[in-house]
Amino acid sequence: MLDLTELVNIDVTVAYVWYAVLLIVKMMLMGPLTGMLRTKKKAFVNPEDTAPFGKGENAKKVHLNDLENIVPFLFIGFFYSFSGVSLSTALLHYRIFFGSRVFHTITYLLALPQPSRALSFLVGYLITFSMIYKLVMVGLSMS
Amino acid sequence: MLDLTELVNIDVTVAYVWYAVLLIVKMMLMGPLTGMLRTKKKAFVNPEDTAPFGKGENAKKVHLNDLENIVPFLFIGFFYSFSGVSLSTALLHYRIFFGSRVFHTITYLLALPQPSRALSFLVGYLITFSMIYKLVMVGLSMS
Amino acid sequence: MLDLTELVNIDVTVAYVWYAVLLIVKMMLMGPLTGMLRTKKKAFVNPEDTAPFGKGENAKKVHLNDLENIVPFLFIGFFYSFSGVSLSTALLHYRIFFGSRVFHTITYLLALPQPSRALSFLVGYLITFSMIYKLVMVGLSMS
């Protein structure tokens, strides 16, 4: 049986809070941005005119995608900070996830062609599962 | 005034983390599944052909329903693990909630007739309120 | 370097849990309410008849707006309770946020004219950023 106090490394949890705050700020900024893009879109009569910024119709979808992916990270990343992981490994995970979500937003804002958005989603998705794998391993070693 | 250290039972919090991780994995798997079902649906010309797997149009709704119900559980279940509840009572709550959400997904994947989906939603909803009731009782006893 | 144990003030975290539970209850009640309003709407043949309660089509949007704003608060408010903030300042933030979301729901239920809903959203949004500002300041003082 593992000693649970061994698992607490406050530096990792502090690192988690930094990345959690950054991700939440990014997510919160997307909301009004979505609204603005939608308004912009309505100002044009011809739907094709909106294509460059465009994606007004996709804005909500991208925002929901944020919610669906960042919320799991916020919980998993928090648990993960108590998994006895080293600071460097934790930072690697947090940074890759953060980078993937920033890139996901950029692909949307600049309307980059697929599979750029799909790939950025996938990287964040897989890094979350990497943290889940560690959690399950620690959980199994405890029982 | 209650002694707060009495309320910490690490076994309950560890049990919470297990069920939280399971629920997040289930929720994360729903995302790509939704996408695949939607793609599958588009492959058919006749909408009726899609009815058996069908529900392509409902996939997003079911996924949102997950988000709307699992996110409250993730917070309430976490607070609840610090409510001084016994491990067996906590496990009962966590397991019923987890079962209700798995069943909710199954009713959708197998396109089971209503009220199966409504009932699975209701069970998860009520068990969350059972945890909220305990939290309020503990909160009132503290003040 | 700040001593992290100085930052723990259990009274603030308990206050956070109270407001978190209240917000989650509010959010959970919106779900079935949304369903009921949608059913009510379908019962009318003439769309204009539904205008007073109306907003059946907006119900989902308002519910999503709840999810998009309350979830960031639940995380930020939790971190904020460990930022060394005084109980009175924390309560001020938690109460303003809670009030803004209750008012947001009321503007929707009573179909109050804009900008009442936009303003209630804005207040909650800005108070969340006020907490984020404090977190960033504490974070910078730690490094």
Image: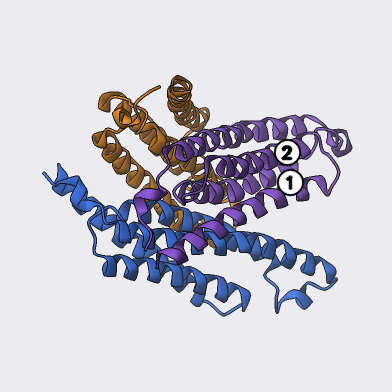
Chain colours: A blue, B orange, C purple
Tag 1–tag 2 contact (CB < 8 Å): yes
Circle 1 residue: C120
Circle 2 residue: C103
Q: Measure the C-alpha gap from mark 1 to mark 2.
A: 6 Å
Q: Residue at x 82, y 73 (%)?
A: A46
Q: Classify 10 Å Cα crowding around label 1: few (below 14), some (14-19), many (20 and above).
A: many
Q: Nearer the viewer, residue C122 or A125?
A: C122
The x, y position of residue C90, in whole percent, is 56, 43
Q: Amino acid at mark 2?
A: Phe
Q: Amino acid at mark 1?
A: Ser
Residue B49 higher or lower than C17, as above or below: below
Protein chain holding label 2: C
The x, y position of residue C57, in whole percent, is 74, 43
Q: Residue at x 68, y 47 (%)?
A: C61
The x, y position of residue A50, in whole percent, is 75, 74
First of labels 1, 2 by sequence position = 2
The x, y position of residue B58, in whole percent, is 56, 46
Residue B59 seen in this snapshot: no
Q: Quadrant of the N terminus of chain B?
A: top left
